[in-house]
Each structure stands twice: as C-alpha cells, then as structure tokens.
C-alpha cells in the first residue's frame, strides 16, 4: 500500500490500481488496520534502539495525503475511520485501537 501511495503521488494511477487489485480481497478489518497505521505514524525515525534506524511505517506528507484516495477505491468494504476529539488541539484525531502497533500493542 505504501507503493500505491508512491505511484499516486507521481500521477501513476495505473500502477496504483495494480496494488489495489492485489489487495482488494483482503479482510476489511486488516485493510482498516493498515490504513490506520499508515495515517497514524508521524515519526520518520524508528523508535527502538537497533541498527534499523528507519521507520518503515512512516510515509512522507505528500504520500500520506494519498492514503485516503487509495482506500476510497475499496468503497464501503472498509469500516470508516473512528475519530476522537482532542479539546486541546480543537481537532478530531484518529482513534488508535488498543491492540494496534500504533498504540503500542502487538498488532495482532
């Protein structure tokens, strides 16, 4: 799906559609989980002390902006994003599920 955002950010809808066609039969819950992870990761650095150093879940802003476009192709098969309101920020933020990697859980 990260590859699809790369293609979309360069105007290559045809190759992004190939990624969609490969993923369109995945479980809706899995697709929603991936969407939340892609939209929720805002740190380009990997948080764990390892040689890895790169956070593979991070998308630069230009590609993150394409995530909703890609997931719109799945139509209503994927549950909508759940949001919570952050009164300090004055905006709605995505809700991270308890078991998700984004919330520090195992992700399974």
Image: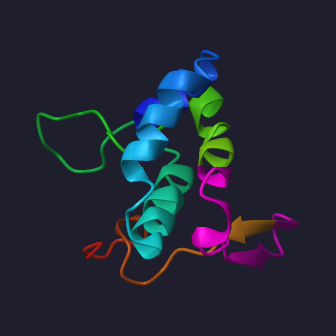
Picture coordinates of residue 94, whole percent (x, y): 65, 68
Question: Which of 75/1 is in front?
Answer: 75
Question: Which of 37/14 is in front?
Answer: 14
Q: Which residues are magenta?
A: 71-91
Picture coordinates of residue 62, whole percent (x, y): 64, 27
The residue at 52%/62% (across/down) is 36
Q: Is residue 69 above or below residue 4?
A: below
Q: Residue furthest left?
A: 51
> Is 63 contained in the magenta span?
no
Left/right placement of residue 67 relative to residue 90 reads left
Q: Residue furthest bottom?
A: 98
The residue at 45%/67% (across/down) is 33
Picture coordinates of residue 98, whole percent (x, y): 43, 84
Question: Which of 42/67 is in front?
Answer: 67
Left/right placement of residue 76 relative to residue 7 reads right
The quadrant holding residue 60 is top right
């Amino acid at each position: 799906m990260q590859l699809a955002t790369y293609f979309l950010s360069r105007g290559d809808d045809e190759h992004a559609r190939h990624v969609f066609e490969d993923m369109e039969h995945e479980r809706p819950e899995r697709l929603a989980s991936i969407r939340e992870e892609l939209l929720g990761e805002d740190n380009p650095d990997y948080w764990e002390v390892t040689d890895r150093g790169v956070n593979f879940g991070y998308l630069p802003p230009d590609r993150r902006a394409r995530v909703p476009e890609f997931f719109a192709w799945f139509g209503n098969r994927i549950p909508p994003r759940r949001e919570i309101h952050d009164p300090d920020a004055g905006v709605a933020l995505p809700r991270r599920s308890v078991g998700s990697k984004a919330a520090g859980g195992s992700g399974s």
